[in-house]
Image (cartoon, helix red, strand yellow):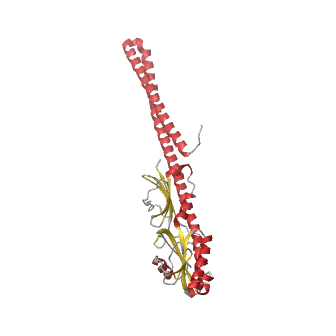
Amino acid sequence: MNGEISLESIGAQTRDAALLTKSTIENITQINWQMNMLGLNARIEAARLGQLGAGFALVADEVRKVSGEILDIATGLGSQLTQRLTDLDTMVTQMSDSAEGTRLVDLAFTAIDLIDRNLYERSCDVRWWATDADLVAACADDDRGRNTRAGQRLGVILDAYTVYCDIWLCDMTGKILANGRPNRFAVTGQTLPDRELIAQLTGDGGREGFVAGDVQPNALMDECPTMAWAAYVRQGGHEAGKPIGILVTQFDWQPQAAAVLASLRFGTQGMDLRAMLCDSKGHILAQRGVNAPQTPPDISQLRNAGWRKTDTGMIGAHQTEGFETWRGKGWFGVVQQAAG
């Protein structure tokens, strides 16, 4: 047999065999009908000849018996083969669905795992940079010279870490003292727009060392979607020191999320797939797909990980498992396949 062997090709061969079985049984039934007609003609001829037709009558009875046996065999064989082939086709379809569903879940896990590993590094960044001596000095004494030095230090960091739009050094009220890209974002002296970030950090008391905000347009950065991270700047740069300021990093969400989704290996069915990163409520944070609609996927029935068939195709999802000290935000990787 030429061509690649797959569950789809096996299913196609099974359906072809079912059609062949049906055709063969129909042929047998037609031949049996012809034998019945021969038997009937023999009985008519035997009746016309009377005693001389006894031989015809004997042949007619044998033909009738053989015909009945053939009909019984053909009917039973056709029914059994049809049922077996139907069961086999169902089994192949289920196996094919399971294999494809598992592949979608694997792709979804890869997406959420890659972004989690990225975000773990972001949590390390903000905690580490919050101990920088120049930043600690600027928070300890709100002095223009120290703030300028802190901004220069943040600019050096941004030159090396291209995944950030900007980094802000704030006092404890959220007023921005310095930022790393003042020529691009004139935010110094303004108040941190995401007040929930400070509330989370205050409520946590800094026990985790950082808090991560939601992906949202940043009002001070031309509505660019960012994910803000915040950590306390502590007195003396010591872990147990008194909080004297807040460092906020602005993670450049769109290009980083797009790179994660672009790395997924869709294979030959790429045009039929749609990959997404979604928050805990299923809202789309990023997606990949030429004709991808904006409607959120329904992942309510999938729990932590799983797949299911829908009216429009198939969907697989996997919820964040976190990475190292990053526990995640309950996000999902989601991959949809359109019906063929």
Vertical placement of residue 152 versus 77, above or below: below
| The N terminus: image quadrant | top right
Vertical placement of residue 80 versus 111, above or below: above
The furthest residue to the front: 183
Question: Does residue 159 appear in the picture of this structure?
Answer: yes
Residue drawn 46% across and 78% down?
Answer: 195
Residue drawn 54% across and 42% down?
Answer: 9
Question: Does residue 109 appear in the picture of this structure?
Answer: no
Tell me: 44 left or right of 121: left
Given residues 213 and 28, the one toward you in this image is 213
Tell me: 56 left or right of 237: left
Vertical placement of residue 337 versus 46, above or below: below
Q: Give the image location of residue 242, x and y in percent.
A: 56, 87
Given residues 37 and 111, the one toward you in this image is 111
Residue drawn 60% across and 78% down?
Answer: 152
Q: Quadrant of residue 36?
A: top left
Residue drawn 57% across and 87% down?
Answer: 140
Q: Give the image location of residue 329, x and y in percent.
A: 51, 70
Q: Give the image location of residue 284, x and y in percent.
A: 46, 63
Q: Quadrant of residue 51?
A: top left
Question: How many labels were placed on the picture?
Answer: 0
Q: Give the image location of residue 83, x and y in percent.
A: 47, 41
Given residues 158 and 333, the one toward you in this image is 158
Vertical placement of residue 229 versus 335, above or below: below
